[in-house]
Image (cartoon, rainbow, N blue to C red):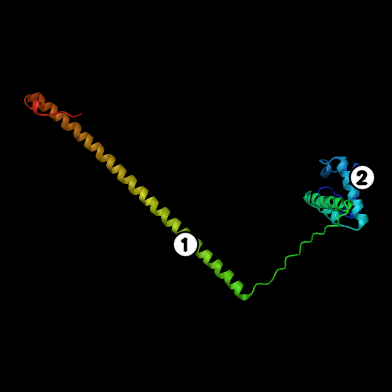
Amino acid sequence: MRVPRLGIPLNPLNILWSAHTLEKCCFYKMLDNSYICDLEDNILMKMANGSTNLVDATLLALETGDMAPLIKEELKCTIQSRRLAKGQHEMKVEFPEETKHELTEEEQDKIVKRREQNRLAAQRFRDRKKTNSTSLCKKIQELEADNTQKSYEIRNLRAEKAKLQTMLYEHLLVCPSAKQSIKFEP
């Protein structure tokens, strides 16, 4: 098996490259030589102690291009070495694997029923939304039609007012006595 980006065969011995070889790899160009040397030293120390976690993390980092597992494992190693240097006991953190249990018939029925209810509720929501949208469109059309009709009435009333004012003005020219009894409002 080869690392896709680098074309390097994957086996634990290939992890122990020299710093010069690592500099040539595009994957490690972002790292400085001191970090690479420290990494090699840590890997050698861990391999000597029989721990393969760091090697596995390095392989994973090479395969995926993600440095997170390698950094995490190196941090764990650093913490452990500091604890041992202080004379404290080695800390072991184990995460138990999650056990998956088969669902009972009742639980499966409950899930099916919940999915069906959810599907029906979603359909009702979509129908309600469509109905509301349709009713809003109708209301908008009605209001626009009403607005158009009222605008037409306003134009007609203004025209009628202008016509009546013209008739009144003409009448006042003929009948001056009517002028005194009429108040003009603009």
Q: Label 1, label 2: how many angstroms apart (C-alpha)? A: 66 Å
Graded by Cα atoms within 10 Å as few (under 14), some (14 to 19) or many (20 or more), the crowding at tag 2 reads: few
In the picture, which quadrant includes the N terminus?
Answer: bottom right
* Amino acid bearing label 2: Ser
- Which structural element holds mark 2? loop
Labels 1 & 2 near each other (Cβ < 8 A): no
Q: Residue furthest front?
A: 87
Name the quadrant containing residue 95: bottom right
Residue located at (91% from left, 52% from top): 45
Q: Which residue is mark 2?
A: 18
Please indicate whether residue 46 sits to the left or right of residue 66 in the image.
right
Residue 15: x, y in percent? Answer: 89, 51
- How many discs mark residues in the rendered view? 2
List x then y, in percent, for residue 22: 88, 44
Query: Residue at (41%, 55%) from the top-left corner?
Result: 132
Which residue is label 1 attached to? 124
Amino acid beneath label 1: Arg
Label 1 crowd (10 A; few <14 / some 14-19 / many >=20): few
58 to the left or right of 171: right
- The structure residue drawn at horizontal position 82% and vertical position 59%, both measured from the top left corner, is 92
Question: Would you say residue 140 is visible in this rendering?
Answer: yes
Question: Can residue 1 be seen in this snapshot?
Answer: no
Q: Residue furthest right?
A: 48
